[in-house]
Amino acid sequence: MRELLDFDVAIEPLGDGYRARVVSSPAGEAYADFALPFTDDNLTILILRVIGSIGRARRKVRQIQSEERRLLEDFGDQLFQAVFSGPVGECLGRSRLVADGRDAGLRIRLRLPGALANIPWEYLHETGYGFLGLSPETALVRYLEMPAPVKPFPVSPPLRILAMVAAPADVPELEGDRRCSGRCACATTTCCTSSGTAATTRTPRTGRSPSRAPTGRPGWSPAAISD
């Protein structure tokens, strides 16, 4: 897995529309004002259609058919063209060039206002590039700013961590053990010594998530490891 460079986009209310502002990226900052390409009612109908298309695909062959895929692509295209227009889209293009020059990818982090949280941004789609969230060179995540710092949760050492690694059969396998061990160690460096933590990884192959920790290992804390 290549290194991912952060491309942070904050979307803020502005009058009757919104402003997309690149607050951090490999190619500097930028902003562009935009209006959503659909009304609230149209958005509700569109989201229901999107959810319905996914449900039908799952009930059939777990693969989105051409008509349903076009619906998702059209929806994602409208979102992309609205948010990543003008200087923001140009900044994204320059950032991709910088990332390619470093043999890296991009992590697009969306900072969303509450009014836009219900939009399925995971279907952002760029014509000629595809769904951003499915690209090996791009990670698409929602970035939530906490209004207050998270309070420490007291634990008695050793700290036991159970990390789950996704392993879809149709994509290259991740280096799960190495990446999870490294991230767990990095996350606990400031609070634990090396002898005060214990981590293990599990890679489910059947798509079923285990509901409990490994047998004989009570007290393990689950952790999600992502880029």
Image (cartoon, rainbow, N blue to C red):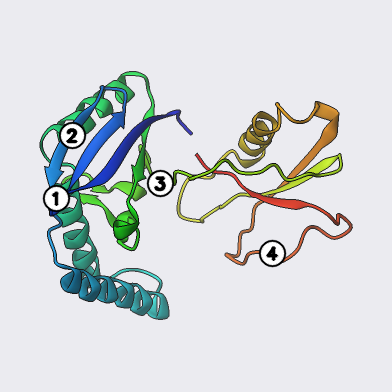
First of labels 3, 1 by sequence position: 1
Which is more foreground, mark 1 or mark 4? Answer: 1
Mark toward the viewer: 4 or 2: 2
The answer to whether residue 115 is left or right of residue 209 is left
Q: Earlier in the sequence, mark 4 or mark 2?
A: 2
Of tags 3 and 4, the one toward the viewer is 3
- Which badge, 1 or 2, comes first in the chain's sequence? 1
- Secondary structure under badge 4? loop
Q: Secondary structure at mark 2?
A: strand
Which residue occupies the foreground of this view, 174 or 21? 21
Which disc number belongs to residue 210? Answer: 4
**SS of the residue at dot 3?**
strand
Q: Which residue type does callout 4 highlight?
A: Pro
Where on the picture, by quarter, is residue 55?
A: bottom left
Q: CA distance from mark 2 to mark 3?
A: 19 Å
Q: Residue at the spot x=76%, y=41% of the render?
A: 199
